[in-house]
Amino acid sequence: MSTVGLLLLSFAAHASTVPIQWQESAHIYTHPRGWRPAGMGPGDLAELESIARTLHTPVYVVLLQGETLPGSGAGQQRLQATTDQLMATWGTQGLDLSRYSVFSVAWGADCNQPPGQRAPGTVCEYFLNTGSEYIHGPAHFLPSRDHAPITN
């Protein structure tokens, strides 16, 4: 197992996870299953899936309902811990932990509102997790060309 894999497993021991099974052929995941952020329809998810399949680097998008994000504390820390745990789990299910990018978004029901008008505890965060091939080498800068269609 790679050093990154061991680090992820270490972080994972201290985090909650969401029950999302990794599938090599799927690039877009939602939790709870079937949930979509406000303003996104089934066609939008299908379009994201189509774009993700064509990218040079393996890119996965995880859309999480902010109200269901596990853990306590700051939303960004919870999303990072949840994503790290998910990557550790996916590593045991076949994901190559050296070569991937996972863009996680936690989106609460009030995220379309200005920050001052959101309900307390609303989580509106995103987190990008990349494999060791991109972190520890010049390739770290290359995946940005693939992230643009997803983040835009």
Image (cartoon, rainbow, N blue to C red):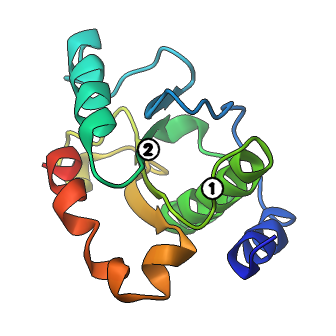
Local SS, label 2: strand
User: Looking at this view, is 29 or 70 the one in front?
Assistant: 29
- Relative placement, left or right, of 105 versus 121 is left
Question: Whole-percent x and y of residue 30?
Answer: 49, 28
| Residue assigned mark 2 | 60
Q: Against 9, is 93 above or below?
A: above
Total label count?
A: 2
Residue found 56% across the figure and 64% down from its top: 80
Left or right of 23 on screen, residue 134: left
91 to 51, vertically: above or below: below
Instruction: Tell me the SS state at disc 1.
Output: loop
Query: Could you tell me if the residues under marks 2 and 1 are in contact, i.e. CB atoms within 8 Å?
Result: no
Q: Which numbered circle lies on residue 96?
A: 1
Q: Residue furthest right?
A: 13
Tell us which disc is closer to us: 2 or 1: 1
Q: Nearer the viewer, residue 113 or 105?
A: 105
Q: What residue do we see at 71% from left, 44% from top?
A: 94
Please give the label number shown on residue 61: none
Residue 138 placed where, x, y %? 34, 87
What is the three-letter code of the residue carrying label 2?
A: Tyr
Residue at 68%, 47% (x, y): give it: 70
- Tell me: 134 left or right of 86: left
Residue at image point 75% right, 75% down: 2
The part of the image, by quadrant, that contains residue 41 is top left
CA separation in Å, label 2 and label 1: 12 Å
Disc 2: CA contacts within 10 A as few (<14), some (14-19) or many (>=20): many
Tag 1 or tag 2, which sits nearer the N-term? 2
Inspect the image, locate mark 1, and give the three-letter code of the amino acid beneath it: Asp
Single out the residue that lies furthest toward the bottom.
137
Report x, y in % for residue 37: 32, 28
Residue 1 placed where, x, y %?
Answer: 82, 70
Q: Is residue 54 above or below residue 73?
A: above
